[in-house]
């Protein structure tokens, strides 16, 4: 897709009086490399705020590419047999699976700990 026509990428640019102005996207380098599992510090917690009382398990602290994060999320959803998603560098698993996910992550070699009650 042509960047000149991608208006969403220029959403916060209002106006420039410079006739030679060229808008550049803020690409802060390449996406960071995925750390090996033993160097990851993952935090597993239970959350039910703003979810109509429904519980979800959150996995945060993953350092790496979004593709690897999606793959880890897919693997956890499959092993727990539930749905979920990956948003804002957080894996969201439907239901209370904190202990099971913590066990799965530790078996896979991740440094993971539980947060909250």
Image (spheres, rainbow, N blue to C red):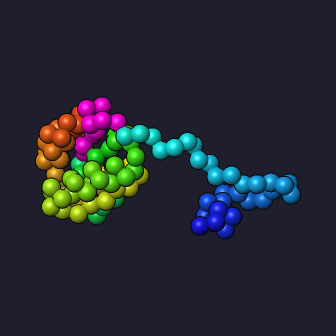
Magenta-highlighted residues: 35-45
Q: Residue at left 64%, top 62%?
A: 3
Residue lying farthest front?
1
- Is 54 magenta? The answer is no
Say above or below: 14 vs 44.
below
Q: Position of residue 50 (x, y in %)?
A: 34, 59
Say above or below: 66 vs 2.
above
* Horizontal relation, residue 31 to residue 22: left or right: left
Q: Check the picture and name the quadrant holding the N terminus.
A: bottom right
Q: Position of residue 86 (x, y in %)?
A: 34, 56
Towards the viewer: 14 or 62: 62
Say above or below: 109 vs 85.
above
Q: Check the picture and name the quadrant holding the C terminus.
A: top left
The total number of labels drawn is 0
Q: Residue at left 25%, top 45%?
A: 45
- Residue 80 seen from this side: yes
Q: Residue at left 13%, top 47%?
A: 100
Residue lying farthest top?
39
Q: Position of residue 53 (x, y in %)?
A: 25, 61
- Residue 7 seen from this side: no
Q: Position of residue 40 (x, y in %)?
A: 30, 35
Residue 16, picture quadrant: bottom right
Q: Residue at left 72%, top 54%?
A: 23
* Horizontal relation, residue 81 to residue 66: left or right: left
* Horizontal relation, residue 97 to residue 68: left or right: left
- Is 44 magenta? The answer is yes
């Amino acid at each position: 897709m042509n960047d000149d026509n991608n208006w969403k990428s220029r959403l916060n640019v209002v106006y420039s009086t410079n006739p030679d102005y060229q808008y550049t996207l803020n690409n802060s380098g390449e996406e960071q490399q995925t750390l090996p599992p033993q160097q990851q510090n993952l935090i597993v917690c239970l959350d039910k705020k703003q979810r109509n009382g429904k519980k979800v398990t959150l996995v945060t602290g993953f350092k790496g590419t979004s593709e690897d994060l999606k793959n880890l999320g897919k693997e956890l959803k499959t092993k727990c047999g539930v749905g979920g998603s990956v948003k804002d560098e957080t894996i969201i698993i439907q239901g209370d699976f904190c202990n099971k996910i913590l066990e799965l992550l530790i078996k896979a070699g991740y440094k993971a700990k539980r947060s909250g009650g």
